[in-house]
Amino acid sequence: QVQLVESGGGLVQAGGSLRLSCAASESIFRINVMGWYRQAPGKQRELVATIGRGGSTDYADSVKARFTISRDGNKNMVYLQMNSLKPEDTAVYYCNAFKLVAASRYNYWGQGTQVTVSS
């Protein structure tokens, strides 16, 4: 069982920046993929960014060149730096951990942190 705790959400004006943090309860190098997802009111949860165990990253087209996912293995932390925020980035942001253990898939989620971007 991996426990994830997000922090860093808040209210920001359009064009501003926020950095989200996700603390994992175990070494992130034991986790295949760490990621950030978001869910806006009335919409499905969507992928924002992922970082693989080897360090490879992937981003949703809507956030490329604005958001950066990173990690600190010593602290078991994953971050999402969000720049040039837009009102459409408003959502609850969730940290996710995906583990593949002996062909079994495990998905773990944090409680979410609210990001609100005002126009």
Image: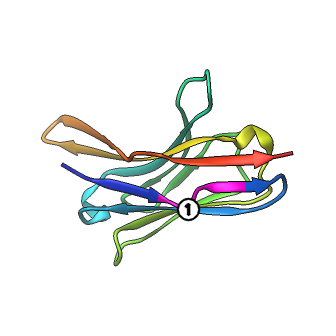
Res 40 quadrant in image: top right
Residue at 17 percent across and 35 percent down: it is 104
Res 65 quadrant in image: bottom right
| Quadrant (top left/top right/bottom left/bottom right) for the C terminus | top right
* Above/below status of 93 relative to 4: above
Q: Give the camera-side residue of 61 and 75.
A: 75
Provide the secondary structure element on which disc 1 rests: loop
Magenta region: which residues? Answer: 7-11
**Coloured how?**
rainbow
* Outermost residue toward the front in this view: 11
Please tell me how crowded label 1 is: few (under 14), some (14-19), or many (20+) other residues with Cα within 10 Å.
Answer: some
Label 1 sits on residue:
8
Residue type at tag 1:
Gly
Judge whether residue 83 is colored magenta: no
Residue at 36 percent across and 73 percent down: it is 73
**Residue 116 in the image: x percent, y percent?**
69, 46
